[in-house]
Image (tube, rainbow, N blue to C red):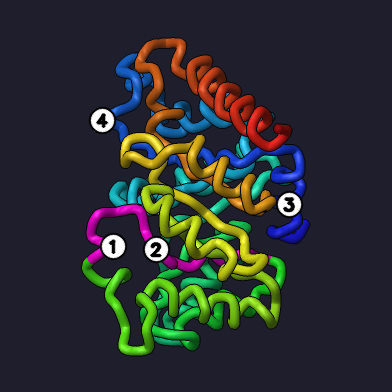
Amino acid sequence: MNAKRKLQLKNDELKFVCVGLDTDIKKIPEFILKEKDPIYFFNKKIIDATREHAAAYKINFAFYEVLGAYGFELIQKTLSEIPNDILIIADAKRGDIRNTSEMYATSVFEHFNFDSVTLNPYMGFDSLEPFLSYENKLNFILGLTSNPGAVDIEKIELKIGKKLFQHIIEKIVEWNKKNNNCGIVFGATNAKDLSENLNSMNDCSILLPGVGKQGGSFEEVLNIFNSFNRKNFLVNISRSIIYSDNSEQFDASAYNEIIKLNQQAKLIFKK
C-alpha cells in the first residue's frame, strides 16, 4: 500500500500518535535484561500493546546503530513485528551528495523496506531526489525542529524577508508537486510558528516531534490542526509511552497511555 495512503487511513480514524521506538537498554525495565534478546523483547511488547491504536511507528536509527551489526539485526526483527497497514518511519535524517543518497535510499526503502524516512534538506534538492524518486514512499523533510538550537540556523531571518525554515517549507511544497510524497518535520515545541505557517505547507503531511519530555503539548497540536480543519499529521511520542512504567506492567501502561491520547484526539476533532 502507498505510504501516504497508510497514513491517511489512520488519520481518518482520528489516530495521530506515532510511537517512537527509541529503545535504550539502560532505560528498559530491569527484569527484561534476563531475556535472551532484551531490546527485541521490549519492542515486541510495546508493539503488541499499541498496534491497534498507533498511527505509525518511528525507529530512531541512532539507538540501533550504536549497537553495531546487532543493531541492524534488531531493526529488521522489530520491523517484522509491525503490521503491514501501519506506516513505519526510519528516523535517519539522511541527505548527502547524490550518489551517496542513492545508497542511503536503497538501504532504507529496499533493504529494510521502510515506508518513510526523515531527511535533512540543507544540501539541496539533488541530495534528496534519490529518496523522492520512490513514488510510493513518504519523505519527512526537516522544516523547523523541536530542539532549542533551531534558533541558531532554522530561524535566521533571510534578506528576502522570511526565515530560513519558511524558505525550506516553500521548497518542500514545490518538490512535493511531482510525486506528492513529501512531508514536513515541524517541532511541536513551536506551536505559535505552527499556527502561523500551517497554511503555507499546503497538503504536505506533517510529523511533529517534541511532545512530552521536550515540552510540546499534544492537546495544543490537536487544537491547532482542528482549527485549520486538517488531519494529515503525526505526533511522535517516544519516552512518555514506551517508558511510562518501569514495572512488569510496562506494556499495559503503554497501552493505557496511547488509549488516553487517542481519546483526547477524538474529543477535540468531534467537537
Numbered disc 1: secondary structure = helix
Q: Residue sitting at 50 percent across and 47 percent down?
A: 58
Residue type, numbered disc 1: Ala
The residue tagged 1 is: 150
Q: Quadrant of residue 161?
A: bottom left
Q: Residues within 10 Å of mark 2 (few under 14, many from 20)?
A: many
Q: Earlier in the sequence, mark 4 or mark 2?
A: 4
Q: Please say if 135 is above or below 41.
A: below
Asked if residue 206 is positioned above or below residue 176 in the image, the reply reads: above
- The kind of residue tagged 2 is Leu
Residue 93 horizontal side relative to residue 11, left or right:
left
Which callout, 2 or 3, points at the residue further toward the start of the chain?
3
Which dot, 2 or 3, sits closer to the camera? 2
The quadrant of the image that shows the N terminus is bottom right
Residue topped by disc 4: 26
Q: What residue is shown with label 3?
A: 8
Question: Is the C-beta separation of discs 1 and 2 under 8 Å?
Answer: yes
Q: Earlier in the sequence, mark 4 or mark 1?
A: 4
Is residue 111 visible to the viewer in this orientation of the structure? no
Between label 3 and label 4, give the one nearer the viewer: 3
Callouts 3 and 1 close, C-beta under 8 Å: no
Category of crowding for the residue at label 1, using alpha-carbon neighbours closer than 10 angstroms: few (below 14), some (14–19), many (at least 20): some
- Residue 43 % position (x, y): 48, 32
Question: Residue 19: where, in percent of width, then height?
Answer: 51, 38
Look at the numbered disc 4 and give the secondary structure of its residue.
Answer: loop
Q: Earlier in the sequence, mark 1 or mark 2?
A: 2
Spatial CA distance of label 4 from label 1 is 28 Å
Q: Which residue is mark 2?
A: 144
The amino acid on which the numbered mark 4 sits, given as a three-letter code, is Lys
Is residue 150 rendered magenta in the image? yes
